[in-house]
């Protein structure tokens, strides 16, 4: 049996994830303090990739440029190109994305384990990429830091299951598929917290879900996400109209069916309208939207157009049943748009009514009706609340997120 060796040098962490997770803020926080050993990801704008796409179309170059963060040294990044190619192949063959991610995410965790075994460093991993690395055997004793970006799956399952019994005609495009995954895949996210020395959560609700599952609350730290607030809002709402906006997947977890039912029952001004910005939407919810008056469904909305929608909306509303954070709330607040959501989101950590942040209990349609009716009277032409909303977003810059992570790591 090989004896474990305790290191005395400054920690150097390995991160691993697919995509542009949280705008690369975790590895950036580590790189800024010279604590990043390696970022393992799927695709990143290395020098070679930049040269290879130099004469590609503008859209391709934009996608490549999006996978880059200037504060992260390129030599600290490793791309799993084989896994990236396999992922895109499975997408083209029609495999469900959740099944593909469940099958391939383990490769990032295994790569992190191999790197830490070689570098004798530490691990800072998101919950989808932690299991294999956290449970591997090492000749040293690496620190295992977990970022739990989504609430514990058991609490999510119970909440969505109870809601599904009440609204059996509403399909769910994400969590319903999760229950069909192999037990080994489900266990990866269900139990990885048990091996963590320190756990970061983006919201108190996510932390609560881990404590319910049995986690030691002394290991858990709540660090809300951040946002870069634009210098000015991209427009102003009509001063005499009540225009509400929902942005997100049209699925059960986001509470869109609750919003549509509440919209049907609310006594709102005749000119009121609800815009749904959904890249995907469940068939049952789409049928519900089609028979709900003064509702407009929009697809294919780009980032600039979305900013304009927020800036010209009276209210952003997303009454999620389960939300790890809900970055879209900060995006709306940054444009001066007050927000309405549930307590099962980041909103209790972000602000209160004086900040243009309003909450209701999840799944309570009567509360949602009352809130919509109240806000339809309060918000139009209310410049004070819109200014307070932008000021609320300004309190959450990404640098605050990174600084807080480092403070907890050093404690």
Image (spheres, helix red, strand yellow):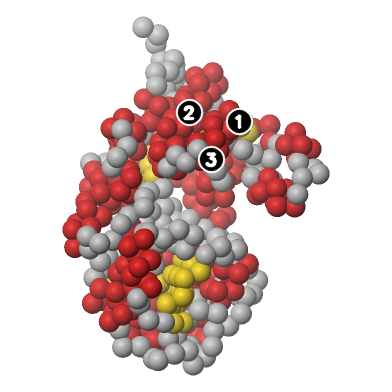
In front of the other: label 3 or label 2? 3
Residue picked out by circle 1: 81
Say whether residue 39 is left or right of residue 221: right
| Helix, strand or loop for disc 2 | helix
How far apart in space, not on screen, are marks 1 and 2 (Cα)? Answer: 11 Å
Q: Which mark is residue 107?
A: 2
As drawn, 10 above or below 199: above
Residue at 36% in and 61% down? 283
How far apart in space, not on screen, are marks 3 and 1 (Cα)? Answer: 17 Å
Say whether residue 311 is left or right of residue 204: right
Residue 96 visible in this rendered orientation of the protein: yes
| Helix, strand or loop for disc 1 | helix
Quadrant for the C terminus in the image: top left
Residue 371 visible in this rendered orientation of the protein: no
Instruction: Provide residue 233's location: percent of width, then percent of height.
Output: 61, 75
Name the N-terminal-most of marks 3 and 2. Answer: 3
Residue at 62% in and 75% down? 234
Quadrant for the N terminus in the image: top left
How far apart in space, not on screen, are marks 3 and 2 (Cα)? Answer: 20 Å
Q: Which mark is residue 92?
A: 3
The tally of labels here is 3
Residue at 25% in and 55% down? 160
């Amino acid at each position: 049996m090989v004896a474990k060796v305790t290191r005395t040098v400054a920690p150097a962490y390995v991160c691993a994830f697919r995509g542009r997770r949280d705008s690369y803020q975790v590895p950036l926080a580590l790189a800024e303090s010279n604590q990043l050993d390696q970022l393992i990801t799927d695709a990143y704008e290395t020098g070679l990739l930049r040269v290879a796409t130099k004469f590609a179309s503008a859209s391709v170059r934009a996608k490549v440029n999006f996978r880059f963060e200037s504060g992260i040294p390129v030599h600290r990044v490793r791309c799993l190109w084989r896994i990236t190619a396999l992922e895109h192949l499975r997408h083209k063959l029609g495999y469900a994305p959740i099944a593909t991610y469940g099958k391939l995410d383990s490769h990032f965790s295994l790569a992190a384990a191999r790197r830490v075994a070689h570098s004798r460093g530490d691990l800072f991993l998101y919950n989808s990429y932690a299991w294999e690395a956290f449970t591997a055997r090492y000749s040293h004793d690496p620190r295992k830091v977990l970022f739990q970006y989504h609430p514990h799956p058991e609490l999510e399952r119970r909440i969505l299951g109870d809601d599904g019994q009440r609204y059996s005609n509403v399909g769910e495009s994400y969590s319903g598929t999760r229950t069909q995954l192999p037990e080994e895949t489900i266990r990866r996210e269900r139990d990885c917290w048990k091996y963590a020395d320190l756990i970061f959560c983006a919201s108190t609700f996510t932390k609560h879900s881990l404590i319910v599952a049995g986690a030691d609350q002394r290991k858990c730290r709540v660090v809300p996400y951040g946002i870069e607030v634009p210098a000015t809002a991209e427009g102003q709402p009509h001063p005499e109209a009540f225009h509400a906006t929902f942005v997100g997947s049209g699925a059960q977890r986001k509470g869109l069916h609750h919003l549509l039912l509440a919209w049907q029952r609310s006594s709102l001004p005749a000119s009121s309208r609800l815009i749904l910005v959904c890249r995907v939407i469940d068939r049952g919810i789409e049928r519900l939207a089609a028979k709900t008056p003064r509702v407009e469904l929009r697809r294919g909305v780009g980032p600039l157009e979305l900013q304009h929608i927020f800036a010209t909306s009276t209210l952003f509303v997303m009454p999620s049943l389960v939300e790890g954070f809900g970055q879209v709330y900060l995006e709306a607040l940054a444009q001066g748009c007050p927000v309405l959501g549930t307590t099962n989101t980041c909103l209790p950590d972000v602000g209160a009514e004086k900040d243009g942040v309003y909450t209701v209990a999840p799944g309570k349609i009567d509360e949602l009706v009352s809130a919509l009716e109240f806000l339809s009277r309060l918000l139009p032409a209310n410049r004070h609340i819109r200014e307070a909303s932008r000021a609320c977003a300004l309190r959450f810059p990404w640098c605050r997120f990174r600084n807080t992570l480092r403070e907890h790591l050093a404690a």
